[in-house]
Image (tube, rainbow, N blue to C red):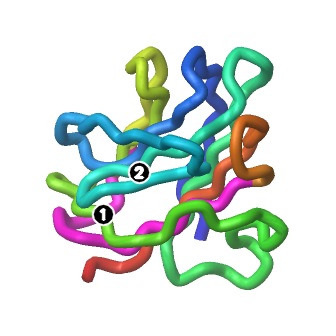
Amino acid sequence: MQIAGVEFRVNHPVLALGSTDWLPVLELGGEAAVGCDTHAAVRVQAQVQLIKVRLFTEPLDEGLGPDPSFTTVFEGPISLADGRLVVGDVMGVTRFVNLIGEAGRRRIRVTVDEPGWNAAAVDISVGPKL
């Protein structure tokens, strides 16, 4: 089920998502996305257009879930310290916070329309508490 949708203008080509805890330094190198225990960083298109982000929780509705044509760039468990998921640019200029549920670890899957520097749409799927 889609629970949120937002559009960001980002000045830096990295979108971060994860816990409300302090964002650690995540080196992307040549990857489209990387993650750690509390956050994921996703390469996106900066300063050109708005970045569309949609947030989904399971169970996913038939036909109303993440775009199936998108490419998965990150999938793994992320610990949400207070049950909230933060999405925003790494410079801290734009930030969206959504209460997902109880604190704890959840499986997160991030898909994008075009992996790398040209990503302009990001779908985030949050699974049940692990």
Residue 104, by quadrant, is bottom left
Question: Residue 59 versus residue 123: which sits nearer the camera?
Answer: 123
Residue 49, by quadrant, is top right
Q: Looking at numbered disc 1 in the image, what kind of residue is underneath it?
A: Ile
Q: From the image, tell me which residue sits under label 1.
A: 78
Question: Residue 52 versus residue 100: which sits nearer the camera?
Answer: 52
Give the percent coordinates (x, y) of residue 10. 60, 21
Give the percent coordinates (x, y) of residue 106. 32, 72
Q: Residues within 10 Å of mark 2 (few under 14, many from 20)?
A: many
Q: Please give the count of numbered marks on the rendered protein.
A: 2
Quarter of the C terminus within the rendering:
bottom left
Instruction: Identify the residue at horizontal 66%, vertical 50% (top origin).
Output: 122
The numbered mark at residue 128 is none
- Residue 46 in magenta stretch: no
Which residues make up the magenta segment? 98-112
The numbered mark at residue 40 is 2
Q: Is 26 placed left or right of 93 in the picture?
A: left
